[in-house]
Structures are given as structure tokens and as C-alpha cells.
Image (cartoon, rainbow, N blue to C red):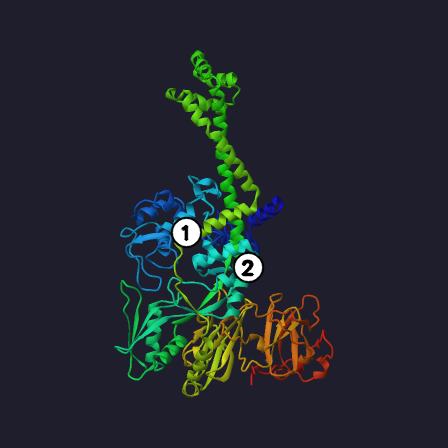
Amino acid sequence: MAKKKKELQDAAKREVPGVVGLHGSVEEQNITQTLEINYMPYAMSVIVSRAIPEIDGFKPSHRKLLYTMYKMGLLSGGRTKSANIVGQTMRLNPHGDAAIYETMVRLSRGYGALLHPFVDSKGNFGKVYSRDMAYAASRYTEAKLDAICTELFRDMDFDTVDMADNYDGTMKEPTLLPTTFPNVLVSSNTGIAVGMASNICGFHLKEVCETAIARMKNPNHDVMETMPAPDFPTGGEILYDPGEMRSIYETGRGSFKVRARWRYQKEGNLIEIYEIPYTTTVEAILDKVSDLIKAGKIKEISDMRDETDLSGLKLTIDLKRGVEPEKLMAKLFRMTTLMDSYPCNFNILIAGMPRVMGVAEILDEWTAWRCQCVKRRVYFQLGKKKDKLHLLQGLEQILLDIDKAIEIIRQTEQESEVVPNLMIGFGIDQIQAEYVAEIKLRNINKEYILKRTAETDELMREIQDLEDTLKSDRRIRKIIIGELEQVCKKYGQPRRTEILYHWDQAAQAEEAQEVPDYPVTIFVSKEGYFKKITPQSLRSSGEQKFKEGDSLAFSQEVTNRSELLIFTDRFQCYKARLSDFDDGKASQLGDYLPTKLGFDPGENVVQVVLPGSYTGFVLFFFENGKVAKVPLSAYDTKSNRKRLTGAYSDKSPLKTILTLEGDELAAIYSTDGRALIFSTAQLMPKTTRSTLGVSVLTLRKKAALDRAALLTDTGIVNQSRYQSKTIPAAGALLRPEDMEEKQITLSLD
């Protein structure tokens, strides 16, 4: 470690052109050293100290705010101005009053982002379902801790968690809060760090506690039996897919659909939407419906307005005469965020390291951590009782001869010698002697001392019981189970989000009938911009418009009901329907796919594939010379998931993707000027999407696979020169007449 540190310091001192030094000199630093010295500490700080929640379910900003309110006495006292809380929290959180107040707003009951809010608020705190409803300034609102915070701080004064210095070392703060229930799963949490993110949905408190109890009693308990699906404070309906939900529970990644709840009012011929998905806002819904009406895609609505008031959310839709409410809502679910996907990424810090875990693993980690908290509490209580017993045992010695104790004190000339003389006179230690010396004169009587020493037997029994508890994991778990049962009883509430177990078949069939089918041409640029243009618009338009520095990467004539597979550089595949995109024009930039499909930060498009009827194969060509042959059917999901993780292997950079209806000849080019022709029939299809593939191109030193294409799309004339009957093979050096390549197009008929 010392050697590595010395190397980094030496590297930082090198002077070469690049960066201006302290005295006007120019210093240069290798990019890898810059990343290691400057960027990596920042990245780790964001991951560990800001964006990713820990096992107690809180980020540092949440924890600092709640602990400050606890120390201010706001757990049992009345409310105080939010500005006071923000000011006090700045002793722990130096990020500024605006950031602290935003944190308080999200945790508040008024905002409604949590199933069980931690801040009991008074005043305007905005609403989670509204984009434009701003919260009032901190000087106008009041707050205190909600009753459920008792479960966060119950063990705070029993040394159950570690305490650390604040940023300036003037006070201590807890590194975790000793929550008596798995708050990490009950409270939804979202955070974007550097190179990673976390998105944890909320679950029903009673279901979580019951599942934690069941897992402690039976480690093989299936969590889906007692905890079937998430729960959201905004309500709505979860379109339940057992396979999809199990995948999320096991891997910690995936997505599921949530849709709004509505009712039809025959009197007035209107629809009232009173619960919407957690991921959207009323303004986003109204804007989208307005755009659809203007575009002529929805003609059944005469008016739509927001009638939200103090009684809660309500969007009202006035229908035209003869409109069937069910069919209209099916169309709105498909075309707006009244039905939306919730992406899950259960990324949690465990011992300072980020880990993506399934629900069962999170519960097991929480149980192990909670066991340590309870053990520390028991050990703390044991120490206090032992200290008290020790003092009472000293009192017993005094009981043998009270007059002697008085005589020792009276005959001692100096105050500093009282304790040593009592120690010598009764054979007790300094702590016991200090305790005896501090007894009031009125209490130096036999009755008082007998009453105090009578506690000795009871204390010894309690100490023995605590020691037995420390030695028994079963008793520790029993304590945790008892606390969880109390939490269920005291804070349990009805489920807010309904689970729809039977929903998909009829809805999908109806949806397929409603989607208009007409020819379109799609265009995808190198930077990921997507356009869908009808033939009429294409004939009347001029040159395709692209961003400066961008150009066309792919185009294809298809129909509006086709599906798209978008492969990214994060080994993921996003599925989309062309009908989800608006018809565009050549003069427009188009939709930016990373934004439209909700890519992770920094994720980019690698290639777009039109799967058609999901027959045939996808060929993945990797830089290390390997090729993976995967059936297109592996990307056909019945649940219409928007994102598939592990879409291809992450062991080597991906260079090219080809699609095939049947086996053909393909050509691979290497960076050292070689080419190889082989038949795709030589590759065996793999059942898993993330297969490593098989070696096809034998690479020389420092060479890599550069690109690949179907033989019909290349300019190779001398096919026999480059063709190989067996793989892997090295291929042959390209001749000049074989270097011309035809324009590569993607054929998916």
C-alpha cells in the first residue's frame, strides 16, 4: 500500500505540457492517474456517501435529517418550523438548506412519496403525483417525527450502532439507524450514483414483516407466498406476471406494469381517474392526452381536466356520446403513462460495498444485521446491570458495619483519603468506595442499605438471563420476531395497490386489433436518434436532418405493428413497438432512444434489430474472435417487458450484430487486414442469451475482430481464398480486389 501511494505521489509531480502548475509551470498527468487520484475518490464518495441506500433503508441525507430531529426532541414533542430543523441539520449535512429541505419534503406525510412517512408535516409540502405543485418555503411549514420513527430510534441509546464524527468533528452521528423492521423494503428509494444506480420499490409493511418472520423460522420459505407484489402510496393496479415478478424477486432487477384506477359515472357520461402509477404525474398524463387529441389519435374525448382537491387526486374525462369507457381506457393505457412500467434495481450498500440482491437475500442480510444490533443492545444492558451489581456488592460490605464506615470517614483528615481508607477498611475497589462515599447522610441507615442490597439476587438472575440470550441465536431471533409482530400490530394498514392476477390475454388481443397497421420507413442515426416516417411524408420531404456530426446508421421499410430490439453497450436489450413512436418527418431530429426507452445513465445504442416473427437467429461478433448464435425466440417475451438484462455476453466488447432467417455464408474481418468466410451452419445455437459463443477467428498478436457482414453484402471476389471448412481459422490477407465493400443493409424478411 505504501509503495502504491509513493508511485501515485511521484506521478502527480511529473511536469509536462498539459495543466498549469502553481508557479505558471505546466504539468501533465496520465489519464489513468487522473482517474485514479481525482475521479475515483469522487465516484466512491457519491456511491458510498450519497446515492445508494444502506441496509437500514436510508441514504446519509435521510439519516442525518431524522437523527437531528430526534436530538431536537421532535419524536414526542410538538411541531417546529421546518427552517429550524433545516438549520440544525446543517451541523451534520453541509450540502445546503435547499437540499436538506427537499429531503424532508420527500419523507413527509404531506408529499405522499412513502407508504409510511417519517415526517409528520403541516403546511404545503407538494404532492408526489404532481409535477407543478411546488412545496412552500421552509419558513411557512412545520414538522416533527412521525410515530413510526419510534421504531427507528428505540435502541439508539443502547450502543446498537456505530457512531462517527460529523464533517467537522464537533459531534457524533450514527452510521446506521437501528430499525426494528426491514425499512429497506418498506420505503421506496431511488438514487443515481457514478456508473450505477438504485431503484427500490416499496412493499407492504405487514407483508414484509410476516415474510421476515417466516424466513427466520424457515430459511427455505418462498417470499412470494407472503409478499406477492410491491405496494405504492399512490395506489393503482399491478398487472401481475408470476414469471416476471419471480425474476425480480430472485435477481433484484426487472420491471413490472402498474396502471391507474378509474370509475365510470353514467350520470354525466364521464370517467374519473383517482389513482395513477407511482412513476408518473397528472401533468404528464394531461399533456400526453392533449397531444393525442391534437394529432387526431383520440377522438372519443370532449374534455379532460384536473379536479384534484383536498379530498385527493381526480382526473375527469368527459366522453362523447356513444363512447365505450372500457375501450377508451384500454387505448389510454396503451398510449399514455396511465399504464407505466416500474424498473427495479435493488442495489444496496452492504458493509460499504454496493450489491444487487433479490428480496430473500435482502431480508436475510437485514436479519443478520438486526441480530447484531440486538446482541449489542443485550450486551450494553448486561454491562449496565453488572456495574449496578458491582456497586450493590460494595454496599453489602458496608452493611456489615455501618458504624465502621462512619468512623473511617470521620477520622480521615483529608478528603482525598476518604476513598482509599474505605477501600482498605472494607476490602472494596475504588468504584465501590466512590459510590459509598457519595451516599447522603440520611441514607446511612440499615433500612436503606437492606432495600438496595435486596436487589442483588434479582440482578444476578437478570444477568444470567442476558448472558444466556447472548449465547443463543434462537433467543435473539425470538426477540426480533416479537418486535416485528408488534410493528405489524401497531403500524399495519390496508394494501393500497391492487394486484390483478388475470388481465393480459384479452387486453393484449384487443390492443393488437386497435393498433393501426400501415407501411412506414424507420431511420436510426449513429447517435441513437429514431424517426418513423410514412411513405406519403417521405415522398414530399427533402434530405434527412441529423444533428451536427451525426449520420444515418440504419434504415428499413416495415409496418407500424412491428417490434424493435435495441441492443446497448451495457449488455441490455430494450423492446419497443413502432406504434409507441409518433410519425415523424425528415426535417425533424426524431426521438432520442436513450431518453424514450429509459436507458441507464451513460448507456448507448449499439445496434437496432427488427425481429419480425422472432424466427431465425442473432449472431453476436465479439472483439476476441468469438461468435454467439442465439435464437431470436430468446428475446420474445409474453409479458412485453421493455428491458431484458443479460442480452449478450459481457466478456468481450461487441463489434457487430447480424440477423438471419436461415444459415448463410458470413465474412469476418480482423484489424490486421485478414478476412475469413465461414458458414453460420458451423455454429450451434445456444439456449442462453449471455453465452460466450465459440471461437471462429484465430487472431494474431495485438489483432482483434474488426467487423462482420453477410457474404452477399461484401465485395469479396475470391471466395475460395478466405473460406474455411473448419473453425476456428486465421483466414487470409485481403487482396486489393476484395477490399471493396458494398453498402451493408439489414434484411429481416
The residue at 51%/33% (across/down) is 460
Residue type indicated by callout 2: His
Name the residue nearer the viewer: 602 or 24: 602
Residue type indicated by callout 1: His
Does dot 2 land on a helix, a strand or a loop? loop
Name the residue nearer the viewer: 425 or 338: 425
The quarter in which the N terminus is drawn is top right
| Mark 1 / mark 2, whichever is N-terminal | 1
| Residue 336 position within the rendered picture, expressed as x and y whole percent measured from the top left | 38, 74
| Residue 653 position within the rendered picture, expressed as x and y whole percent measured from the top left | 60, 67
Alpha carbon separation for disc pair 1 and 2: 32 Å
Q: Is residue 604 visible?
A: no
| Residue 29 position within the rendered picture, expressed as x and y whole percent measured from the top left | 55, 53
- Say if 634 sits above or below 136 in the image: below
Answer with the quarter of the image where residue 728 lies.
bottom right
Answer with the quarter of the image where residue 136 lies.
bottom left
Q: Is residue 624 visible?
A: yes
Name the residue nearer the viewer: 637 or 324: 324
The residue at 40%/76% (across/down) is 335
- Say if 318 sits above or below 79 in the image: below
Q: Residues within 10 Å of mark 1 (few under 14, many from 20)?
A: some
- Residue indicated by mark 2: 221
- Residue indicated by mark 1: 62
